[in-house]
Image (tube, rainbow, N blue to C red):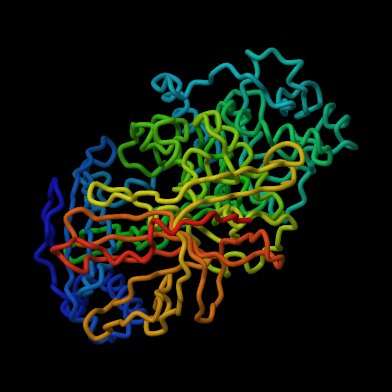
Amino acid sequence: MATKPAAQPATLPHWPSIERLEESSQTCACCRTLLGCAQERASDAAGRFNKFEVDQMRTLPLVASTRSSTVRTLAAGEIRNTRIDVKLCLPNLFHYFFSLEITSLETTCPARAVDPPWQDFPTSTEARVDKIREWLQVCDEWHPACRLESQSRMPRRLIDLSSEGHVSARLVQTQAIPSSQTVYTALSYCWGDAHILKTTKATLDRHLKYLPIHEIPLTITDAFAITRRLGLRYVWVDALCIVQDDEDDWNGEVENMHEIFAGSYLTLLASEADSAAGGLFTEQPRDFSGRADYDRTFLHTQLDGGRSLRMHLCPQKRQQSALRKRGWTLQEEMLSRRTVQVSNCELVWHCQCGAIREIETNGKMQEMSQEKSGTVRDAKTAEGNWRSLLENYSGRHLSVPDDRLRALAGLASFFQQLRHDECLLGLWRKSLLEDLMWRRIGNAAERSLQPQPTQMLPSWSPLSCDQSVDFNAWNSNTSYSRPDCVADIVRCCVVWTAQPWLSSIHSSSLVLRGPTRELFLEEVTEIPDCNPPYFNIDEEEVKIDEYPLPWRCAVQWDSEGYRPPRKWKCLLLQRKTVSGFALGGETFLVLEVANEVPSPVYYRRIGIGSLGCHRTAASTGTQRWKFELDEVEEISIV
């Protein structure tokens, strides 16, 4: 399959269907790869929609576009990269997208024509630490936004690696160190099931004299070695620097977590090790046949004529490392000014101004704006950043379920200062109505092995859902779609027993005033495995033969499980109109009575729904809205 280089995406005269792609795949490696992707999506679509059979899917249209670029390097000469974007078109429904990146290994440098350019990267620990030092020097010199500001509060303790006498490492109280000398690295890692040496009340005095190196797991001692080689004296590791059985010390440092990681010179991310015993580096050959952070990779393939290609699939969802599956590590990574992700496959650098991967062929740090670099420190994008972070956090695991609030304490404190707003269990007072439109997207398998927390959170908080959530499902504001909130916040408050986020919740309340209605909801069985599922509402007539998706109501329950057909109390949050189209939508909460005492009535949120609306008469412009805006009610949600 040949493609032309193009500065802008160009439509390709490609094989028009899966059936034709099957024929070409017999002789073309690229087509074989694309065929596997297309067949996987076709099988998924056939399973979801009874309208299509697998054999029918073979004749559906395929449309491809391409974008190419060339990189010139001293070591490898000219390297060409082509991205092919393909969509499988389902009539009257939607499109399935997938992409393929192809990197040519044929270079203009004869001496390097055989080996892929990424196979010469240093493999020894010393050489890789030298690479980290090189990136640090670039960042120190060229990135003012990454430089440390004067800290208002230091960690209470650091680990001193100065090797005085026979002691190779010991704890020190930072109050005894001049602030100008407290440059330190921080370690973000998974504790796992490994035995970890911890500082406790009983061992604190000993650790202030020396740390028994032979009892410290490999990931932590690797962090010691990297810190020393970078020429730094101090490192912060939570298990050793926090007195684990001292509640006051633990709470104080957790509350200060945003300053601890923001104040580190560099944070080391142990991305591959699933326990503290795994280590940061392993001295073994590394596989660079494909990018390590994608779900599926393809080895480089020898094609006719001796030309070699490396191919890998680029799905929407990136594969998560062990570190990015743990709840506590989110704030550690996001609050740091500079991080380096350490794995056996490669190093990945990320700071406020740039990013670079060890396998990048041009060897230059990619300059980024703060928004593109993913920094959380930009007040202009703070609202969207928080929602993205909470979506990320909701899919992570905690060994201690009651840490669900504590592991967000540092981020909540940081964002409250950044936004000048109050965080109410994951939602924000100034954007509370929009934030209430969160939706569960995960499933029970995510939490099947997790113990349940002892503290119950109010149902309106996304943190009460023990599965992944998102905020963008039915709350998008675009140039052609404008949502209008129609409910009002009467009251919302959270009362803590002691420190916010670190103590138990004494009480909470949310009172909304808005249009309400009882809707009869019956889950649709004609289309299985839809997420969220479709519903028949109020026994409306549905013309299944005329439209592939004739249902206009979708509801996502906050917890999995079938609900039998019945009427539910619903509260309208927003209406949305689409300019230029006879379309609109209503987003509403689904509620159930939470108390047995008849008065006053308290409700519990159990789901969120969306109703598609369209004009019933073009001349009058009326919409088939389900809710009447003048039929309002005050609702208390617990």
- The one of 515 and 495 positioned closer to us in this rendering: 515
Q: Position of residue 283 (x, y in %)?
A: 56, 48
> In this rendering, does residue 18 appear at all?
yes
Q: Residue furthest left?
A: 13
Q: Which quadrant of the view contains residue 619?
A: bottom left
Q: Residue at image x 18%, y 66%?
A: 304
Q: Is residue 351 above or below residue 490?
A: above
Left or right: 135 in relation to 637: left
Left or right: 563 in relation to 547: right
Q: Which quadrant of the view contains residue 406?
A: top right
- The one of 169 and 85 positioned closer to us in this rendering: 85
- The one of 312 and 405 positioned closer to us in this rendering: 405
Which corner quadrant holds the N terminus? bottom left
Q: Position of residue 585 (x, y in %)?
A: 32, 61
The mark tally for this picture is 0
Left or right: 357 in relation to 258: left
Q: Residue furthest right?
A: 202
Q: Residue at image x 85%, y 32%?
A: 204
Q: Position of residue 90 (x, y in %)?
A: 23, 74
Q: Position of residue 129 (x, y in %)?
A: 53, 34
- The one of 248 and 174 positioned closer to us in this rendering: 248
Q: Is residue 475 above or below residue 299?
A: above
> In this rendering, does residue 364 appear at all?
no
Which corner quadrant holds the C terminus? bottom right
Left or right: 514 in relation to 550: right
Q: Residue at image x 72%, y 25%?
A: 160
Q: Which quadrant of the view contains residue 605?
A: bottom right
